[in-house]
Image (cartoon, rainbow, N blue to C red):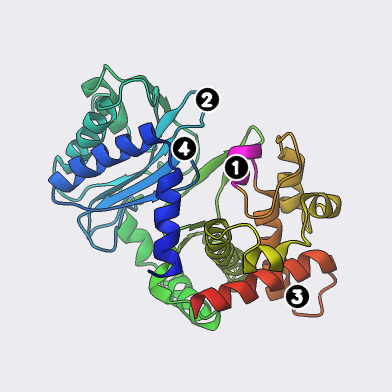
């Protein structure tokens, strides 16, 4: 058994049994629709599920090739909730059937997740309601919380059509550049996606447009912005790929017993030492300011669950961004630079 296989078993063993049962029920229902399904636990009470008609697990709204859905079972939210992250359907009615399959799975564990959350950015339909409002009415026994963050995602048709955006010279240029950058970083370009979607997230009580996202399944999504320069595109990718390396090392670290080689390699980076350094950029310092844990964050811990932000993970990613942007001679906190180098060295060993 490889270390990643061992890790997956370890993480599943730690998942809250009630959440795990819900995830299993939802997975069965989605597979019954003929979908490819992938489930990823993140800590004790978070499980991410993606399902798609494509083996590539495409879930991006507006994709013309495949239907899919991505969701999160968030047992530590207040209240515990199922969050729909993305959904796309190219077959009439399949979107509704996917939601129905998830809702039937949710009903298998009444009271485990007490709310369904979705940020509805679908166009207003002829009856004056959005698509998700119809889904909520169809499953009225479920407690729904639907938000409609104002942004330019609601482009007037037909300009909102993903095909129109993805065929523009600027989008095609950035897509080619992103492939080149991925290879430059030693990453398989198929793991990096340029998405026409606008992704909005809430942080510190405000809404922000996301430039990119890395997920523990080894994928990076960069959200298309016509104003993003090639240099900024490279900085964004450097930041997100550092997250992927961190995820891999974090998982291996948590899978081994105390006193293992990774524990010894990182034992000098104590919570007190890292908290005393704070971040290396405004963005990483915002994560330090937002930390709500009773004690300083621990390296390779589930920072989001424990303190509501990710100061360590984000600071290391910002170091990678600074090194790409300014070169190896950039003046940056030596402790954070050393930690980033240690993470990369451990990742290289695990990858081999």
**Figure quadrant of residue 120:** top left
Foreground tag (1 vs 4): 4
Q: Crowding near pointer 2: few (<14 within 10 Å), some, many (20+)?
A: few
Q: Which of marks 4 and 3 is nearer the N terminus?
A: 4
Secondary structure under tag 3 reads: helix
Residue of label 1: 304
Residue 224 or 190: which is nearer the viewer? 190
- Say which residue label 3 marks: 326
Badge 1 vs badge 4, beta-carbon distance below 8 Å: no
Task: Find the distance from the CA under tag 1 to the CA under tag 4.
Answer: 12 Å
136 relative to 66, above or below: above
Q: Which of marks 3 and 2 is in front?
A: 2
Say if the magenta span includes residue 306: yes
Q: Which residue lies furthest to the top in this view?
A: 141
Query: Which residue is identified by label 4?
Result: 45
| Distance from the alpha carbon under mark 1 to that under mark 2 | 13 Å
Task: Give the mark nearest the N terminus, 2 or 4.
Answer: 4
């Amino acid at each position: 058994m490889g270390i990643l296989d061992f890790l997956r078993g370890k993480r599943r063993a730690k998942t809250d049994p009630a959440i795990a049962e819900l995830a299993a029920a939802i997975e069965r229902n989605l597979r019954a629709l003929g979908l490819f399904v992938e489930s990823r636990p993140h800590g004790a009470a978070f499980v991410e599920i993606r399902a798609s008609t494509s083996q590539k697990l495409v879930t991006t709204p507006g994709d013309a090739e495949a239907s899919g859905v991505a969701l999160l079972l968030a047992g530590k939210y207040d209240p515990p909730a199922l969050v729909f992250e993305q959904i796309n359907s190219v077959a009439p009615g399949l979107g509704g059937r996917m939601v129905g399959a998830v809702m039937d799975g949710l009903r298998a564990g009444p009271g485990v997740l007490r709310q369904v959350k979705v940020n509805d950015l679908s166009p207003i339909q002829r009856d004056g309601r959005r698509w998700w409002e119809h889904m909520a009415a169809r499953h009225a026994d479920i407690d729904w919380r639907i938000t409609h963050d104002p942004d330019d995602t609601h482009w007037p048709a037909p300009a909102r059509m993903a095909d129109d955006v993805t065929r523009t010279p600027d989008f095609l240029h950035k897509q080619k550049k992103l492939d080149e950058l991925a290879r430059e970083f030693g990453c398989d370009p198929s793991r990096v996606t340029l998405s026409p979607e606008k992704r909005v997230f809430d942080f510190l009580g405000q809404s922000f447009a996301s430039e990119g996202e890395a997920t523990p399944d080894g994928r990076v999504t960069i959200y298309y912005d016509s104003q993003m320069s090639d240099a900024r595109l490279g900085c964004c990718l450097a930041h997100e790929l550092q997250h992927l390396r961190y995820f891999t090392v974090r998982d291996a670290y948590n899978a081994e017993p105390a006193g293992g080689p990774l524990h010894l390699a990182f034992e000098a980076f104590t919570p007190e030492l890292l908290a005393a350094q704070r971040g290396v950029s405004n963005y990483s310092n915002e994560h330090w300011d937002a930390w709500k844990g009773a004690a300083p964050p621990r390296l390779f811990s589930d920072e989001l669950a424990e303190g509501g932000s990710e100061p360590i993970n984000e600071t290391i990613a910002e170091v990678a961004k600074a090194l790409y942007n300014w070169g190896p001679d950039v003046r940056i906190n030596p402790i954070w630079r050393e930690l980033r180098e240690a993470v990369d060295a451990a990742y290289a060993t695990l990858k081999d």
